[in-house]
Image (cartoon, grey):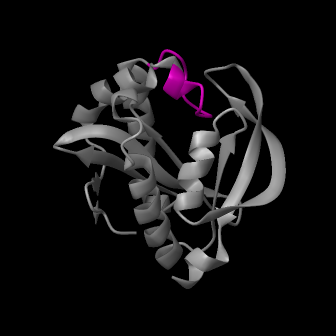
Amino acid sequence: MRKTIEAERLKLRPLRCTDAAAISRFTSDPGVARMLGSVPLPNPVVAVEGWMMILKARAHLGSDYVYVMEAFGDLVGVIGAHARGAGYELGYWVGRPFWGMGFATEAARAVAGEARASLGGIEASHYLDNPASGRVLEKAGFVYTGDVQPRFSLARGEHVDTRIMTLGAAALAA
């Protein structure tokens, strides 16, 4: 996958050490953290820095492609494709001040297109109580598989029913 991806309003770029404070601030919002699998609540800067160091150490494996969503020169969210089993899984979040602006959809379309071209199969999922994320993924070309699985949410401290999606045939033909 390319190091930087340009979308209509977003620049999707690699993480920088200076992003840690903004990532911590946004992902320490319960409304954001509760919809993510592996983010603690709160998410202190030191935890974000540790996560970033792990990603850097694993970079040679080609198993994680993580991008900052940057709009208007500001970090608005993070999106990534992560190796899972035989394929990759798309995950993302957007900071609360930027909800409803279409950034998640724009980023998901861009990364899904890039992943489809270079990584092959890609899946995504969302917790049942987050239908907005399902709409984002549908707009990006994902379709429901019909599977619902319990997946752990660190911020909630429990398993949550999750709807599984895959990049649809129409998106694959595009």
The answer, for residue 33, to whether it is visible in the render is yes
Along the viewing direction, whichever of 113 and 44 lies nearer the viewer: 113
The residue at the far bottom in this view is 173
* Magenta span dominant secondary structure: loop
Whole-percent x and y of residue 137? 57, 55
In the rendered image of this protein, does residue 66 appear above or below residue 150? below
The answer, for residue 90, to whether it is visible in the render is no
121 left or right of 107 in image: right
Whole-percent x and y of residue 141? 57, 66
Whole-percent x and y of residue 1? 40, 69
Please tell me whether residue 40 belongs to the stretch shown in magenta.
yes
> What range of the chain is rendered magenta?
31-43
Residue drawn at 66 percent across, 43 percent down: 126
81 left or right of 167 in image: left
Whole-percent x and y of residue 33? 53, 26
5 left or right of 94 in image: left
The residue at the far left in this view is 73
Please tell me whether residue 173 belongs to the stretch shown in magenta.
no
In the rendered image of this protein, does residue 25 appear above or below residue 148? above
Along the viewing direction, whichever of 38 and 169 lies nearer the viewer: 169
Along the viewing direction, whichever of 63 and 124 lies nearer the viewer: 124
Residue drawn at 64 percent across, 25 percent down: 154
Q: How many labels does the image show?
A: 0
